[in-house]
Image: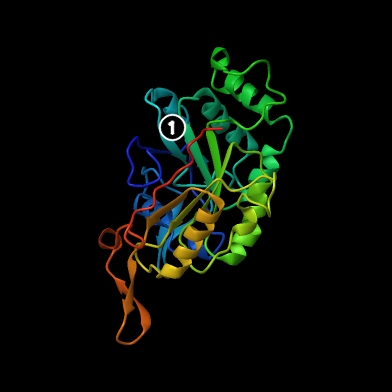
Amino acid sequence: MSDKTGIEWTDATWNPLRGCTRVSEGCRNCYAERVAARFSGPGQPYAGLAERTAKGPRWTGKVALIESALDQPLRWRKPRRIFCNSMSDLFHEDAPDEWIDRVFAVMALAPQHQFQVLTKRPERMQAYLSNPHVGVNWFNATDCVLGMPDMWPYDGLARDLGPLPNVWLGTSVEDQPTADARIPHLLATPAAVRFVSAEPLLGPVNVESGLPGPRVGGKPCIHWLIVGGESGPGARPMEADWVRSLRDQCAAAGVPFFFKQWGAWVPWDSDKFSLVEFLQVGRRAARRMLDGRIHDAMPGVRA
């Protein structure tokens, strides 16, 4: 956890859970898996959760709740955008509901912050947050587990508590098949703000059906879109037209668009051969410019 981060679309990271499992092609070069494997020796933070193998870093599939990190946001008085679980997935299949209850209880107790929860498992997120008694579970976690019942900011037990206004819920996609599989679950999840992170973007993606406009009407929609290329060892290139398409889809729907990075590769247009090639220059050299400008729009409201 850190109150400073290099992730461009957030201010801080908070990791009450550690450990994960690969679920799709976008996980192949996972930065979190790489970092965890580096610190997986005996007595280190990710011992038993990741390992170095002949094929590279690998999660072991185990997840852990980090008790000492659980109340960290409550000690941050200055309002922040906080990325919840940059080193795990809150909705991992082996994380008990009771763990998730405790994480949401902390987010409810810290209304000064905006929490950004990103998952590759939106089907579980939908099921969890569709439970009509989920607010009661958060209250019970606050009362019985955290020992802070007097801090509960809502009336009663919040049996009918709607989406927490300071929690943004998102899903990661890398191509059209993952977008088609995951975004419907996101749209069906009660949320104050819904967002999609297309990173690493490995192919063209159309999200128009989930954006606000005539096709959607008054139905739940995507409020924010992040796009980024892959970085690190084994990074795969991202075509500029894939990014432009998502930028234009957002512009047409009036949805904030955030271009995070090109990744390790930058597109290069060759007039001589009329081909699009890629130069592997590294993340820092590739930077964030798209067609001469930086795109860093974000949702302007918390509810």
Q: Is residue 224 left or right of residue 10?
A: right
Q: Which residue is mark 1?
A: 69
Q: Is residue 139 depicted above or below 299 in this figure?
A: above
Q: Residue at x 60, y 60 (%)?
A: 179
Up/down of 235 relative to 168, above or below = below
Q: Is residue 20 left or right of residue 143?
A: left
Q: Position of residue 194 (x, y in %)?
A: 57, 44
Image height of 82 relative to 28, above or below:
above
**Residue type pointed to by label 1:** Ala
Q: Residue furthest top?
A: 150
Kindly give the residue lying farthest to the bottom in the view shown. 273
Which residue is at 62% across, 39% downward? Answer: 96
| Residue 238 visible from this viewpoint | no
In the picture, the quarter occupied by the C terminus is top right
Q: Quadrant of residue 54?
A: bottom left
For this rendering, which residue is in front, 32 or 227? 227
Residue drawn at x 38%, y 69% as measured from the top left: 234
